């Protein structure tokens, strides 16, 4: 049996022209960087997390081809569109690839793209740049799937920045491709975390930690940093600070300003504002 390895490609910040996604000062926002993990052996490979746009998918496909391995699988960790909208161009490029996700993720994708093209936020944020939804999403086997004889195991962790989140665990190399469960120096999206979501996210982090990984690839990451298990604790600290702030019942502007003050080095203030906009309006 050959030894597996992994490499990470990061699609950088992506400008979004939608008027609904401007920063509080009126400046245009950008989408957070996205990490794509290629797990590969001697002959074949699996990709965790397709990108958003057709252009990103083309660049990612060029990078994958450079490894000279057969792309056997694509795995989608959760239902947010920025983690699967670029799947179809990759399916068309890599003949015979199987796209796996858990049933919860498959249902979330279908809710956004029931008739094929994505609806809601995505076409407004990326006009003319996104493809149709994946044509064939297969439920991941309960005992995982294999690359060159090594098991890749989907692990359901519950709620992180959205419901029905998962990670992909590769025990033979101590790898967790963590999707949006773990963030790496990028502001975390908390817009779906009211009413118990922060506690649920901490439980998801506990699950990842229990896998005792040597490498953790965050779905949104600063490509200048490594894929370190310490990002689990950093993600938890951000949740703790946000919870303390939310306990003061801040208005949207105060929440935005304070999280930027607490984490000035983190990438993408638009994510903070998107979270703030989900807070109840405060008056008086």
Image (spheres, rainbow, N blue to C red):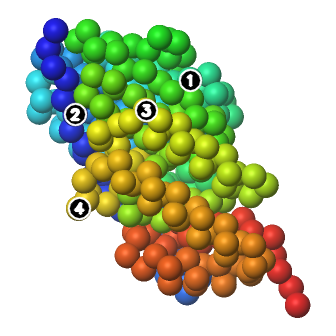
The quadrant the N terminus occupies is top left
- In the picture of the structure, the residue carrying the numbered disc 4 is 224
Q: Secondary structure at mark 1?
A: loop
- 10 Å crowding of disc 4: few (<14), some (14-19), many (20+): few
**In screen coordinates, is 225 left or right of 269?**
left
How far, Cα to Cα, is label 4 from label 1? 31 Å
Q: Nearer the viewer, residue 111 or 141?
A: 141
Q: Which mark is residue 102?
A: 1
Query: Residue at the spot x=25%, y=45% of the render?
Result: 9
**Image coords of residue 15 (percent x, y):** 41, 65
- In the picture of the structure, the residue carrying the numbered disc 2 is 6
**In screen coordinates, is 66 left or right of 199?**
left
How far, Cα to Cα, is label 2 from label 3? 18 Å
Of tags 1 and 2, the one toward the viewer is 2
How far, Cα to Cα, is label 4 from label 3? 25 Å
Report if the CB atoms under discs 1 and 2 are less than 8 Å apart: no
- In the picture of the structure, the residue carrying the numbered disc 3 is 211
**Image coords of residue 252 (percent x, y):** 70, 78
Report if the CB atoms under discs 4 and 3 are less than 8 Å apart: no
Q: Nearer the viewer, residue 252 or 158?
A: 158
The quadrant the C terminus occupies is bottom right
Of tags 1 and 3, the one toward the viewer is 3
**For residue 21, above or below residue 155:** below
Residue 58 makes an appearance in the image:
no
- 10 Å crowding of disc 2: few (<14), some (14-19), many (20+): some
**Image coords of residue 101 (percent x, y):** 51, 24
How far, Cα to Cα, is label 1 from label 3? 19 Å
Of tags 2 and 3, the one toward the viewer is 3
- 10 Å crowding of disc 1: few (<14), some (14-19), many (20+): many
Q: Residue furthest right?
A: 284
Q: Give the mark nearer the N terminus: 4 vs 2.
A: 2
Q: Give the mark nearer the N terminus: 1 vs 2.
A: 2
């Amino acid at each position: 049996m050959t030894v597996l390895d992994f490499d990470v490609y990061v699609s950088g910040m992506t400008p979004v022209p939608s008027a609904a996604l401007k920063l509080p000062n009126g400046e245009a926002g950008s989408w957070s960087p996205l990490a794509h993990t290629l797990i590969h052996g001697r002959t074949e490979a699996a990709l965790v997390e397709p990108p958003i746009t057709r252009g990103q998918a083309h660049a990612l496909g060029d990078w994958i081809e450079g490894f000279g391995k057969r792309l056997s699988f694509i795995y989608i960790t959760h239902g947010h569109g920025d983690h699967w909208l670029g799947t179809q161009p990759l399916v068309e490029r890599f003949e015979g690839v199987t796209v796996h996700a858990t049933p919860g993720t498959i249902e979330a994708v279908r809710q956004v793209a029931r008739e094929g093209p994505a609806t809601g936020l995505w076409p407004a944020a990326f006009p003319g740049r996104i493809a149709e939804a994946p044509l064939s999403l297969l439920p991941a086997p309960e005992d995982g799937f294999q690359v060159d004889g090594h098991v890749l195991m989907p692990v359901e962790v519950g709620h992180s920045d959205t419901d029905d989140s998962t990670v992909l665990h590769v025990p033979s190399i101590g790898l967790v491709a963590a999707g949006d469960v773990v963030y790496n120096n990028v502001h975390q999206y908390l817009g779906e975390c009211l009413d118990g979501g922060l506690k649920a996210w901490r439980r998801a982090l506990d699950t990842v930690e229990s896998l005792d990984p040597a490498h953790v690839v965050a779905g949104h990451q600063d490509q200048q940093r490594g894929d370190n298990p310490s990002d689990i604790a950093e993600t938890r600290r951000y949740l703790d600070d946000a919870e303390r702030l939310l306990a003061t019942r801040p208005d949207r502007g105060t929440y935005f300003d304070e999280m930027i003050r607490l984490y000035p080095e983190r990438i993408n203030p638009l994510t903070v504002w998107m979270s703030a906009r989900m807070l109840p309006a405060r008056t008086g």
